[in-house]
Image (tube, rainbow, N blue to C red):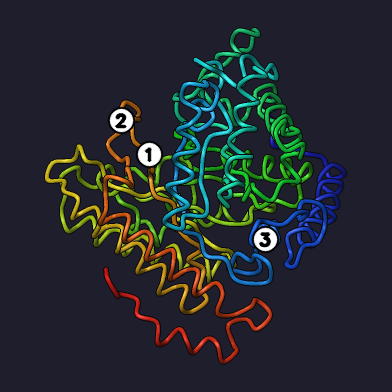
Amino acid sequence: MVSHKQSFSSKFIFLAASFVLVMFIKNANSAPFDEAGNEGEMEDGAAWTMVQKSGNQFVLNGQPFYVNGFNTYWLMVFAADQSTRGKVTEVFQQASAVGLSVCRTWAFNDGQWRALQKTPAVYDEDVFKALDFVVSEAKKFKIRLILSLVNNWEAYGGKSQYVKWGKAAGLNLTSDDDFFSHPTLKSYYKAHVKAVLNRVNTFTNMTYKDDPTIFGWELMNEPRCESDPSGDKLHAWIEEMAVYVKTIDPKHLVQIGLEGFYGPSTPNKAQINPNSYAQQVGTDFIRNHQVLGVDFASAHMYPDSWISQEISDAHIGFTKTWMQAHIEDAENYLNMPVVFSEFGVSAKDPGYNSTFRDSLISTVYTILLNSTKKGGAGGGSLLWQVFPEGTDYMDDGYAIVLSKALSTSNIVSLHSKRLNTYNSLCSWKCHWGCKKKHALDNFQLHEEL
């Protein structure tokens, strides 16, 4: 275990270094950004530039950028096989057709079938080339990627695989949560971060850390540290790793990957959590997102997992309360956008029907549009999850095949059009204060929903 005791001198050095870094990060992440990574234009003449953030909004080419996106986690694994690589192109093509502009996917597969990282810092080059393909293909369809760097869960390896590697190396480890505190396991993770961020794409010849196709980095998918309900162990890991990512790549945005549960630092907000257990998993929405190097917040929404599996109107009510609380906290405490980076409903739930799914999606979109209208911190949302046809065997119940779900596709497409209208109405320089803002008042939010 890492000792938290430090000498006065080491604390001083750390604080001094942190001050220098925060100034560097602020300069790197302020709009506009004109350094490496902004080269090239898309076919329509628009510059393909880094997404940045200014205050509680994302910014792109001098305008607010609100996200309508999706998850498809398995893209790298499918791209590694020529017989399934075409599905990557299909999902990007179909998502782009309804205006989805950001995709969240895994940049990890640790020690498993078709592993990217076979053992610590040892990679399968063919699988890395598959990730290269995913990044290059996304750009063709004007889709940006949020790349997640490790899993909290066992799927695709996750922190448990890092612990297995540590035990194989002779380390005395007693819990999967040792991932967050043992120096050797942290060094394994840092080596993976370094390998991915410094990767030179074999299709584009561009280093990942310089590629505007990448929207941002996610430290971990749904981190939890249940062995320490105080949250201190996970918080220390977030502090260390957010800064580490920024030392390699100060230009891209960074998020943690949290589910959004309120923790011990905000006991007055515990009632917003879906259940009492959520406060005991070692995460802390506000405290964790105040860490140096974290640029935007995340929250997930699964009322069918967190409240009750059976479909009910309570799911809609929870979604409204959950979203509004996180948007307000992002504005009042964090001064950053919040992205609802996973949300959906399972077709396996008792009482499920597509009408309810459409109602849930419409609810999410309406709340975000209301925030957008005010220039608020509701930065966007990512459906869990969008699949092309012929991938049913990967479906966890939440998959949306756009070509088979016309009503859902229409809702998604309409939301994309509305966001594009908002994004283009006003440049960042006018801070939503110019006369163009009043055009929003005449924009019909509920049209065709």
Callout 3 amino acid: Gln
Among all residues in the image, which is located at the extreme front? 43
Q: Marks 1 and 2, Cα distance to the nearest angstrom?
A: 8 Å
- Picture coordinates of residue 125 (x, y %)? 67, 19
Name the residue beneath numbered marker 3: 52
Label 1 close to label 3 by CB (< 8 Å): no
Dividing the picture into quadrants, the one containing residue 423 is bottom right
Q: Is residue 233 left or right of residue 324?
A: right
Q: Residues within 10 Å of mark 1 (few under 14, many from 20)?
A: many
Q: Residue at x 69, y 32 (%)?
A: 196
First reached walking from the N terminus: tag 1 or tag 2:
1
First reached walking from the N terminus: tag 1 or tag 3:
3
Callout 2 amino acid: Asp
Callout 1 amino acid: Phe
Label 1 close to label 2 by CB (< 8 Å): yes
The image quadrant where one finds the C terminus is bottom left
Q: Marks 2 and 3, Cα distance to the nearest angstrom?
A: 36 Å
First reached walking from the N terminus: tag 2 or tag 3:
3
Comparing 83 with 322, the one in front is: 83
Q: Residue at x 84, y 42 (%)?
A: 10
Comparing 63 with 335, the one in front is: 63
Name the residue beneath numbered marker 1: 387
Q: Residue at x 38, y 45 (%)?
A: 384
Dividing the picture into quadrants, the one containing residue 319 is bottom left
Name the residue beneath numbered marker 2: 392
Q: Residues within 10 Å of mark 3 (few under 14, many from 20)?
A: many
Q: Eyeballing the image, is 250 above or below 125?
A: below
Q: Residues within 10 Å of mark 2 (few under 14, many from 20)?
A: few
